[in-house]
Image (cartoon, rainbow, N blue to C red):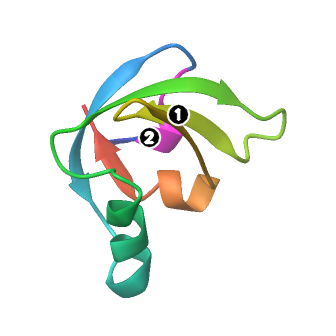
């Protein structure tokens, strides 16, 4: 299983599944990250947290923990 956290800078990946439950999963979905959407990894901070991505035409920063819950291919 590959997660968004493991994705390299400059790669575009497709969301397969969201792990997690309750409010955390709902918050990720509210940011526009849903199954089937493409996500482009723009930057990663020096210590790996946060990760800046482009999704649905806008830029978004995600914590490492949240990115680890997003399964991609």
Q: Residue at x 51, y 26 (%)?
A: 41
Q: Nearer the viewer, residue 15 or 1?
A: 15
Asked if the residues shown at circle 2 and circle 1 are in contact, with their CB atoms under 8 angstroms apart, the answer is yes
Q: Nearer the viewer, residue 71 or 60?
A: 60
First in sequence: mark 2 or mark 1?
A: 2
Asked whether the viewer can see residue 1, the reply is no
Q: Which residues are magenta?
A: 4-8
Is 14 on the left or on the right of 60, as rendered?
Answer: left
Q: Where does label 1 land, which residue?
A: 53
Q: Residue at x 36, y 52 (%)?
A: 70
Q: Residue furthest right?
A: 46
What main secondary structure does the magenta stretch of the protein show? helix
Q: Is residue 72 above or below residue 64?
A: above
Q: Which mark is residue 4?
A: 2
Q: Which mark is residue 39?
A: none
Residue 63, image quadrant:
bottom right
Q: Is residue 69 above or below residue 54?
A: below
Is 37 on the left or on the right of 4, as rendered?
Answer: left
Q: Residues within 10 Å of mark 1 (few under 14, many from 20)?
A: many
Spot occupied by residue 35 in the image (x, y as percentages of width and height): 18, 49
Q: Looking at the rendering, in which quadrant would you find the N terminus? A: top left
Q: Looking at the rendering, in which quadrant would you find the C terminus? A: top left
Spot occupied by residue 67 in the image (x, y as percentages of width and height): 50, 51
Residue 3, image quadrant:
top left
Q: Residue at x 30, y 47 (%)?
A: 71
How many numbered marks does the figure carry? 2
């Amino acid at each position: 299983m590959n997660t968004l956290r493991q994705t390299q800078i400059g790669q575009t990946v497709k969301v397969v599944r969201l792990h997690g439950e309750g409010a955390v999963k709902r918050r990720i979905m509210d940011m526009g990250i849903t199954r089937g959407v493409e996500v482009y990894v723009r930057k990663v901070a020096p210590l790996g947290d946060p990760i800046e991505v482009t999704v649905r035409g806008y830029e978004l920063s995600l914590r490492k923990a949240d990115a680890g819950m997003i399964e991609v291919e």
